Image: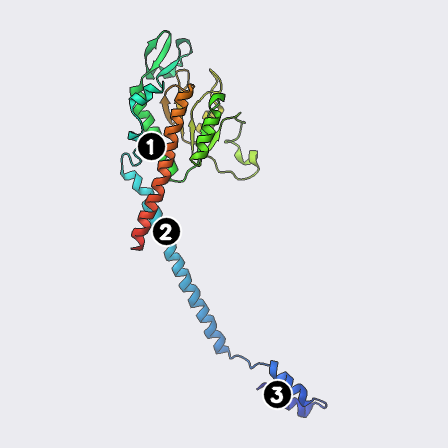
């Protein structure tokens, strides 16, 4: 068709050379019929629809796996096996039963007191055992659901130990001065939208002998669950999971670091195990 048009121009327009006609026919292409365009567009739409259906199918499969993974731990009383992580004798050996002097007793801690010896209070470890197991179980559940765990303490002796433990289990620690508004006004403090911790774990709930850590109050304000070791001079009321125990002896804090690290690692390991299990089941 293009060659015919050029030949017609050669006869009508003077000086329209045959050389130009020969070169022009090389780059002039015949017009594609409209029906071919329609067929091509229909094919592209069908391909896109098939790809979308495949993507939707993959998303549905992933959502089904996610729901199964999240529901599995709720079917078991002790899914992470925290009940075999320690015994009452272990708590006694690490001096978890030793409290402060009688004069520093917080009235709200009376229910957890076993007795006294030489003016020092003794914590009832039989009450501590189930409360500590509940705290460890909840911590493992948070780690299993890919939550952020923040370990908090203000004791200078144990800063290095707690920060090292948090790093080893892939979580976070805050052992310095707590600036006001870090949780309650995080977006303004950091200048951007900030994800808050999903769990606070307090190895000590005090800044000093009688002053409560500001983060305990802030976590309660923001409805963030909290686990806290409460000594005889502490207030357990604002904590989600209070655990009566000695909070300032280095060997005791080392024991806390060991078991909470183990709880976090068990939660993460179980998550990987369940994801592999249900994905294999979905594929088969």
Give the distance between the C-alpha atoms of the residues marked 1 and 2, in whole angstroms.
26 Å
Image-quadrant location for residue 120: top left
Q: Which mark is residue 62?
A: 2
Q: Is residue 220 above or below residue 193?
A: above
Residue drawn at x 60%, y 87% is: 3
Discs 3/2, front: 2
Q: Secondary structure at mark 1?
A: helix
The foreground one among 106 and 208 is 208
Residue 256: x and y in percent read: 39, 26
Q: Secondary structure at mark 2?
A: helix
Residue drawn at x 35%, y 36% is: 266
Q: Which residue is mark 3?
A: 5
Mark 1 and mark 3 in contact? Answer it, CB < 8 Å: no
Give the distance between the C-alpha atoms of the residues marked 1 and 3, in whole angstroms.
85 Å
Image-quadrant location for residue 248: top left
The foreground one among 133 and 220 is 133
Q: Which residue is mark 1?
A: 137
Asked if one can make out residue 221 in the rendered structure from this viewpoint, the answer is no
- Classify 10 Å Cα crowding around label 3: few (below 14), some (14-19), many (20 and above): few
Residue 198: x and y in percent read: 43, 35
Quadrant in which the N terminus appears: bottom right
Residue drawn at x 29%, y 22% is: 88
């Amino acid at each position: 068709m293009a060659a015919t048009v050029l030949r017609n121009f050669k006869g009508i327009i003077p000086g329209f050379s045959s050389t130009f006609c020969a070169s022009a026919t090389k780059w002039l292409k015949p017009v594609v019929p409209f029906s071919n365009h329609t067929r091509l567009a229909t094919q592209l739409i069908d391909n896109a629809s098939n790809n979308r259906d495949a993507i939707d199918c993959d998303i549905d499969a992933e959502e089904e796996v996610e729901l199964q993974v999240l529901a599995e731990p709720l079917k078991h009383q002790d899914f992470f096996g925290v009940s075999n992580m320690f015994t009452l004798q272990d708590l006694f050996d690490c001096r978890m039963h030793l409290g402060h002097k009688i004069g520093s007793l917080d009235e709200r801690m009376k229910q957890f007191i076993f007795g006294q010896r030489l003016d020092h209070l003794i914590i009832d470890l039989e009450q501590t055992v189930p409360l500590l197991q509940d705290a460890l179980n909840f911590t493992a559940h948070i780690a299993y659901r890919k939550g952020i765990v923040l370990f908090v303490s203000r004791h200078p002796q144990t800063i290095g130990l707690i920060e090292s433990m948090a790093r080893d289990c892939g979580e976070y620690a805050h052992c310095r001065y707590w600036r006001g508004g870090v949780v309650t006004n995080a977006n303004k403090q950091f200048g951007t939208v900030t994800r808050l911790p999903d769990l606070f774990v307090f190895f000590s709930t005090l800044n000093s002998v009688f002053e409560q850590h500001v983060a305990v109050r802030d976590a309660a304000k923001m409805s963030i669950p909290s686990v806290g070791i409460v000594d005889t001079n502490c207030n357990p009321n604002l904590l989600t999971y209070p655990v009566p125990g000695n909070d300032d002896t280095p060997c005791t804090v080392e024991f806390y670091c060991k078991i909470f690290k183990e709880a976090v690692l068990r939660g993460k390991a179980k998550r990987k195990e369940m994801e592999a299990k249900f994905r294999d089941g979905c594929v088969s």
